[in-house]
Image (tube, coloured by chain):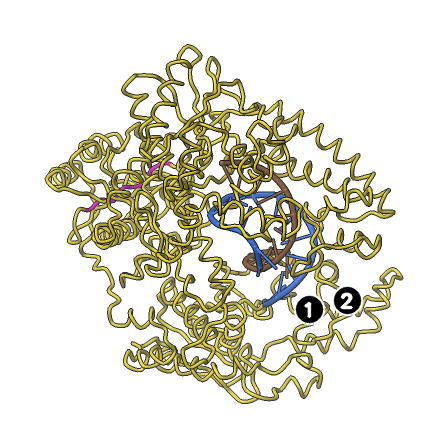
Chain colours: A yellow, B brown, C blue
Amino acid sequence: MKQEVYLIDGSAYIYRAFHGVKPLSNSKGMQTNAVFGFINILRKLMREKNPRYVAVAFDSRGKVFRHEMYSDYKAHRPPMPEELAVQVPYIRDFIASSNILSLEEPGIEADDLIASAARVLSARGLQVVIVSGDKDLLQLVDDSVVMWDPMKEKVMDTAAVEAKYGVAIGQLLDMFALVGDSSDNVPGVPGIGPKTAEKLIAEYQSLENLYDRIDTMKPSKMKERLIENRDSAFLSRDLIRLKEDAVVPEEPELYALREGDDAKLAELYAELEFSSFLKEIDTSEKIETEKFSSITTNAQLEQVVQELLGKKQVVIDTETTSLDARRARLVGVSICSDLDRAWYVPIGHLDAEGVRVAGQLDEGTVKELLAPLLLAPGILKIGHNLKYDYTVLNRQWQMNMANPLADTMIAAHLLEVPGRSLKLDDLCRDLGIRMTTFEEVVGQDKRDDCFAYVDPESACNYSCEDVYGTLSLWQNYHDQLIAKRLDHLFNELEMPLMPILAEMEMRGICIDEHLLGDLSAEFLGKLAEIEQRIYAVAGQTFNINSPRQLGQILFEELNLPHGRKTKTGYSTDVKVLEKLAPKHELPALILEYRTLAKLQSTYVEKLATFQDPESGRIHTSFNQAVTATGRLSSSNPNLQNIPIRGEEGNRIRQAFVPAEGQLFVSADYSQIDLRVLAHYSGDKALVDAFRAGDDIHTRTAAQIFGVSPLLVTGDMRRVAKSINFGIVYGMSSFGLSGQLGISRKEAQSFIDKYFTLYSGVKQFMEDIVVQAKEDGFVTTLMNRRRAVPEINSSNRIQREFAERTAINTPIQGTAADIIKLAMLKVAAALRDADVPATLLLQIHDELVFEVPEDQVEVAKKIIQKSMEEAMQLDVPLVVNVTVGKSLAK
DNA sequence: GTATCCCCGTAC
DNA sequence: GACGTACGGGGATACT
């Protein structure tokens, strides 16, 4: 293997960091985002590539030699913005303090310095990696030069370049010359784009050839353009061609990366207030690889397992051939119990020919030997994203890891701020642990099952690092969970739930693809018909899916009154269109089209693509570490937002069917959010309503309108329902007026009336906001917490948003706690009663089961009872149960 | 051309 | 700005 040298396009990344990183400044008010972004790019390089030779090239200030060739070169470029210019010295300081070679020369651009360095270094036998995203540098790619863009994580070698541009590497320059470059103001041949240029160069091979034979070309506009712009084409090529004879250091050792000056870097980070970087200086420990060993004989494994059986916890990580746990085959397993030793058991490594590598343990034997460990009820099984490993072991070994379990990803989700990356490497970095990345270990291999081809030694190091890192995290989180009194939530709710979610995912749900096929044909027919009518009414064709084009037609051509505006133009959402519907035929048609198109693209067409060929069923992912409130989320596909309203929604639900001989049993909590609110607020009127078992919306309506419940009309109930929902979300009069299509004043009077009647609710809302301002977080009944730092913000919009969050999260989050608890209780009760009902879906306040027909009655009772008794509130929890041959009503 | 933002709409 | 939590399709935009 040749030594690699990384040549970084410094100037380009300064701009990219400036534009790509959100505004950031230190307390002195200096913008720091470009420095931050730039340092991050360098750190990513260091982390992922661990380079030995590095240099960063910068553009020279002022005019460069290309201006002499072409005075308009880069003429459209505005000067560097002041906010960026002040950051550049800090970037240079960072490079200097890090002891990275910096390349710079008056009159020469960064690209040319890179070209020159690439030439001398590849001549010295080094493999050159250009770190850039600029296509102009691709002309340098050859057998010993590749390009890598850390933002795109893609390596461009000659094959990749030729595949992307459709011409040989040597022809790239000629092709670019024809296209030109608007950002550098390189003219090219006007009217020739990448596609045309590709065709021309593929046909004529070079610019010279093209112009030599231009007379043979058929007359066309393109030919005229080519002839007219002959000089421009050749000038463009000269402009784009990089200078390879600039003066750069030739001795590779001058590019060697030396230890950075931590003192200077610390000073720099302190001034810029990059506390996370500051923290890492000198604390970043490389894991000592001598702690890691591969297990290559049964006796060794037996001995290790024997030792671990005496411990109270073990960390496990599986290495497999796929990110999809249901398809994954095992390649190896790593285990550890403390930070002194970690072991890797290679099982399914293959050589380049796809032949199983010698010296690995037999999978059946590994399974037998590990079983006592993984099934031990007295040993805590720790992992990161443990549901994945649980599923793999279930599928491959028909073995279910036994409680107690601990997932560091879920722990992180409970403890860290919302939106934080929960990837193992990212979390470990905070502890100062540097991990080998997946890319580093698999290299350029892009195959799905690439890990199988990693040599067992590298895999051992990588996998052992993972269990080592996971254990480090756990030691940290374990204490934090206790300190924040989140250990009960974690140990008694979230972790026991994990295997249930894994079972739900593995079980999947059956769809009738023929029904979906019929539906698709029908919807497509209707859509085509509505589309034609829309074009007829509009008097032109346009893209109906484009809010912009639609807005143009509705509000500028038809001059219909526009409603609110969005950042990019007129709003064309359902509220606006409904208002216009009486005035014109078009908005009504658009509404019809939108509904159908949404259902068609998101559900009818999409669902069938998720059908597993093996099971014929759809296997969603239930994500336990995503939402800010503690709800689950569902993806690939999302089965928590299957349409339910309207005839079409029902048709889609009909396509979800139980297995042969079984029925769906669906159980949903009635008004769980409002019941939680009643409990929290202790509001007398609300509590009484639920204790009396009244229809809550009707009762609210009766009170607001001051009539007997018997005299409540549909409209009155609708108003009350909107208010009840709005309360839970912290709605304003503005929101309610929009929802109900009434004036703000009317809406406000409804809200006032509501709060007079339900003063306890008002009090609760005020109290929770005060509490949140004090604590900086809010909690649910099971003590799940969510930080709301913006609640003390001086920005009113941010603060009000945080206030609504503070009101909504305890309610939504407690409802999530309750149904999660119910899932545990239902599963246990069904198991105890030996009723073979399986949970398929959780949709926030609803559980859907698949039950053999003859067991439906007993299952119904158990499900309802378990759910209603899941948690004891001051008001009863009520569950409605329905049975069906599909999810349709 | 590709990644990302924005709008929109489905669910609870 | 205006009602909370999600996921995802598709167009427009931004960057190359």
Most foreground residue, A436 or A5: A436
Q: Secondary structure at mark 2?
A: helix
Q: Is residue A659 left or right of residue A251?
A: right
Kindly report the secondary structure that dominates the magenta region of the rendered protein. Answer: strand
Most foreground residue, A384 or A83: A83
Q: Would you say residue A322 is visible in this rendering?
A: no
Which amino acid, by three-letter code, is at mark 2? Answer: Leu
Q: Which residues are magenta?
A: A329-336
Per the model, the C-alpha gap separating discs 1 and 2 is: 10 Å
Percent across and percent down for residue A621 are: 44, 38
Disc number placed over residue A174 in the picture, else none: 1
Q: Mark 2 falls within which chain? A: A
> Which residue does the image show at 16% across and 50% down from the upper left?
A338
Q: Which residue is mark 2?
A: A210
Quarter residue A161 falls in = bottom right
Q: Indicate the quadrant containing the C terminus of chain A: top left, top right, bottom left or bottom right.
A: top right
> Which residue does the image show at 69% across and 56% down from the upper left?
A564
Percent across and percent down for residue A408 are: 29, 48
Which amino acid, by three-letter code, is at mark 1? Answer: Asp
Q: Mark 1 falls within which chain? A: A
Percent across and percent down for residue A86 are: 49, 84
Q: Secondary structure at mark 1?
A: helix
How busy is the neighbourhood of tag 1: few (under 14 within 10 Å), some, or many (20 plus)? many
- In this view, which residue lies farthest toward the top? A854
How busy is the neighbourhood of tag 2: few (under 14 within 10 Å), some, or many (20 plus)? some
Q: Are marks 1 and 2 in contact (CB under 8 Å)?
A: yes
